[in-house]
Image (cartoon, rainbow, N blue to C red):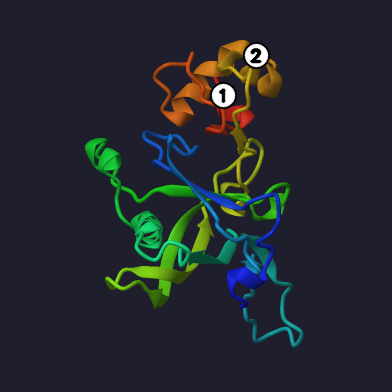
């Protein structure tokens, strides 16, 4: 895979990884945003895969054998490479801090421990309108190669490889084993947005603002800073 500097690094639309608290209770929507990891360079390549599971029962009687039985679609998996470079500021620790935030995606969050449901963060990768690559996932692995160091030994260039695994949840009328996601998505707040207006626009019910607030850990619905990212729950998870 090519290094990030050779990819779409000059694109106006930046890829990002929203790192969320895991849900509590029976919710299948990510919790509040812990951190939004904005890519310095857009990926040069993404690897996305999904497999279908079939079952075949051997038989000794029929020469051709029975037809295979479809068992369901397995969750998606995606591998993405992140290139980090702070060589313009060789005395800084930007790369070190960013790598630490990615590595923390494999660690249990303090809030989930306090809720007695220990879990690492849930994440959502986003890149403009590339909806196929946008799904709720957990980070299966983070591999880091440091390739340049400052005079104090602090890394100033690194390549990180993330393996993301989709977290499926059943939608109404679908087989829970199908691996289908609820139709949830992430909305970036712009000036003039409010929980009431979002609830009306997304669900046709201004009372659904409570579900948005709960999904994002919002204590004060009157404060929505521009640029913040909100998880919008699936319609069947919303209560007015």
Whether residue 53 is visible here, answered yes or no, is no
**Residue in the picture at 31% in, 55% down:** 107
Name the quarter where the C terminus is drawn: top right
Residue 13, given in percent of the width and then of the height, sits at 69, 49
Residue shown at 33% from the left, 48% from the top:
119
Q: Position of residue 229 (x, y in %)?
A: 54, 35
Q: Earlier in the sequence, mark 2 or mark 1?
A: 2
Residue nearer the viewer, 194 or 21: 194
Disc number at residue 238? 1
Question: Which residue is the site of mark 2?
Answer: 205
Q: Quadrant of residue 54?
A: bottom right
Which residue corresponds to the image point at 56% horizontal and 24% vertical from the top-left? Answer: 238
Q: Residue at x 44, y 70 (%)?
A: 157
Question: Disc 2, disc 1: CB below 8 Å?
Answer: yes
Image vertical order of residue 24 relative to residue 70, above or below: above
Relative to residue 121, is residue 123 drawn left or right?
right
> Helix, strand or loop at disc 1?
loop
Left or right, 28 with reference to 199: left
């Amino acid at each position: 895979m090519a290094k990030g500097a050779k990819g779409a690094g000059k694109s106006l639309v930046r890829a990002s990884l929203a790192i969320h608290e895991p849900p509590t209770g029976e919710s299948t929507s990510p919790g509040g945003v812990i951190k939004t990891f904005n890519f310095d360079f857009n990926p040069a390549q993404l690897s996305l895969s999904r497999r279908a599971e079939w079952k075949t029962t051997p038989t000794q009687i029929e020469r051709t054998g029975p037809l295979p039985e479809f068992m369901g679609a397995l969750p998606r998996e995606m591998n993405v490479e992140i290139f980090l470079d702070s060589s313009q500021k060789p005395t800084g620790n930007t790369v070190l801090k960013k790598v630490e935030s990615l590595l923390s995606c494999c660690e249990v969050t303090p809030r989930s421990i306090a809720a007695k449901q220990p879990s690492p963060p849930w994440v959502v990768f986003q890149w403009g309108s590339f909806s196929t690559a946008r799904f709720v996932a957990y980070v299966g692995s983070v591999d880091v190669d440091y390739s340049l160091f400052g005079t104090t030994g602090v890394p100033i260039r690194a390549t990180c490889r993330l393996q993301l695994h989709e977290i499926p949840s059943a939608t109404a009328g679908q087989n829970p084993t199908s691996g289908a996601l609820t139709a949830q998505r992430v909305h970036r707040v712009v000036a003039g947005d409010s929980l009431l207006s979002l609830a009306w626009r997304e669900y046709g019910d201004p009372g659904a603002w409570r579900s948005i607030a709960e999904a994002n850990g919002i204590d004060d619905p009157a404060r929505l800073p521009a640029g913040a990212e909100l998880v919008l729950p699936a319609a069947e998870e919303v209560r007015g």
